[in-house]
Amino acid sequence: MKILAIDSSGLVASVAVVTEGAMLAEYTVNYKKTHSQTLLPMLDEIVKMIELELSEIDAIAVAKGPGSFTGLRIGSATAKGLGLALEKPLIGVPTVDALAYNLCGTDRVICPLMDARRNQVYTGLYKFKDEKFTIIQEQTATDIHEIIKQINEIGQPVIYLGDGMDVYKEVLITETQFLIYLHRVI
């Protein structure tokens, strides 16, 4: 199975082609252009590089939020247009879940943080148990102090990641009671 994946939920845009066992290609851009200018050229480049016919794609995965309203609309419209033209199903992927999955295999609690402004973050809590991705707290918008309180109640080391990590770094360090790790992911 080959899946085309599109993420335009934040400042960074990504397009990838994955199978069950491997990522065949990935193209990520973090530049001052809108996703409407970058997604299709990125897709075109990937298709050329791996000599892929788009008809070979089995499904299209797209970030469904939370995130930039305009970015999400552009990604969804691109995925929907391709899905209709190619007669392929769409798979909506929660942005915060996908961010957490970057740390596949860790034994720590994972807390992605996307800045929602006004001391609010889009977040969730995750853990890998027996190599299985487990959701402790579904993705939600909440006050930064509330998610730290939940983490402290769990009482285990935590890995923070995402753009909210830099915004709330001092609060995370001073209020989290257990060992913390700050992890950078594009």
Image (cartoon, helix red, strand yellow):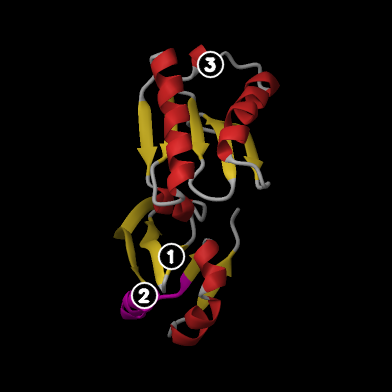
x and y percent of residue 165 in the render? 53, 69
- Is residue 58 visible from the viewing direction of this image? no
> Which structural element holds mark 3?
helix
Range of magenta residues: 144-158
x and y percent of residue 5 in the render? 50, 33
| Label 3, label 2: how far apart the Cα atoms are | 43 Å
The label nearer to you, 3 versus 2, is 3
Q: Earlier in the sequence, mark 3 or mark 2?
A: 3
Q: Earlier in the sequence, mark 1 or mark 3?
A: 3
Magenta span dominant secondary structure: helix
Q: Quadrant of residue 135?
A: bottom left
Q: Amino acid at mark 3?
A: Leu
**Label at residue 54:** 3
Q: Nearer the viewer, residue 2 or 32?
A: 32
Residue visible at 53% across and 16% down in the picture: 54
> Which structural element holds mark 1?
strand
**Label at residue 111:** 1
Identify residue for label 2: 151
Residue visible at 38% across and 47% down in the picture: 94
Q: Can you say which quadrant of the picture contains the N terminus?
A: top left
x and y percent of residue 39 in the render? 58, 32
Q: Is residue 136 above or below residue 40?
A: below
Q: Amino acid at mark 1?
A: Cys
- Magenta run includes residue 186: no
Q: Amino acid at mark 2?
A: Ile
Q: Quadrant of residue 49?
A: top right
x and y percent of residue 118 in the render? 41, 72
Q: Is residue 11 above or below residue 150?
A: above
